[in-house]
Image (cartoon, rainbow, N blue to C red):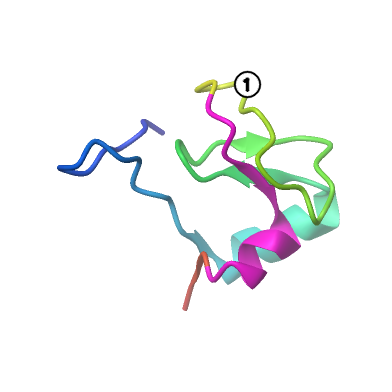
Amino acid sequence: MAVEYGKSGKIIPKRFTLDEIEQASEDMVGFCLACGEEAECCEPDARNYKCSACGNSQVFGAEELVLMGRVTP
């Protein structure tokens, strides 16, 4: 996925489905809020890890994304 920017130039954070989060939790995977790519070997409470796909430090663990409210209903 590509990184999307708002009018102010800030990154528009991605959102994820509950199914994606549950699967990521089982597989120890996180997601990049900037580009939406999966990041392997990611702790559930990971915050601001560097994304290998886009280079932004926006990778968060599955459970952390739930706590942040980044899950779509």
From what the image shows, is residue 61 above or below residue 48? Answer: below
In front here: 27 or 13? 13
The stretch of residues the image draws in magenta is 56-69
Q: Please, what secondary structure does the residue beneath circle 1 have?
A: loop
Q: Position of residue 27 (x, y in %)?
A: 82, 49
Tell me if mark 1 has few (under 14), some (14-19) or many (20+) residues whose alpha carbon lies within 10 angstroms of its own: few
Q: Residue at x 81, y 55 (%)?
A: 44
* Most distant residue in the left direction: 7
The amino acid on which the numbered mark 1 sits, given as a three-letter code, is: Ser
Would residue 31 be found to the left or right of residue 17 on screen?
Answer: right
From what the image shows, is residue 39 above or below residue 33? Answer: above
Quadrant occupied by the N terminus: top left
Q: Residue at x 64, y 69 (%)?
A: 66
Q: Quadrant of residue 50?
A: top right
In front here: 7 or 53? 7
* Most distant residue in the front direction: 8
Q: Residue at x 69, y 35 (%)?
A: 49
Residue, disc 1: 52
From what the image shows, is residue 66 above or below residue 36? Answer: below
Q: Position of residue 23 (x, y in %)?
A: 73, 58
Q: Residue at x 45, y 36 (%)?
A: 35
Q: How many marks?
A: 1
Instruction: Look at the image and say whether residue 59 sits in the magenta stretch.
Output: yes
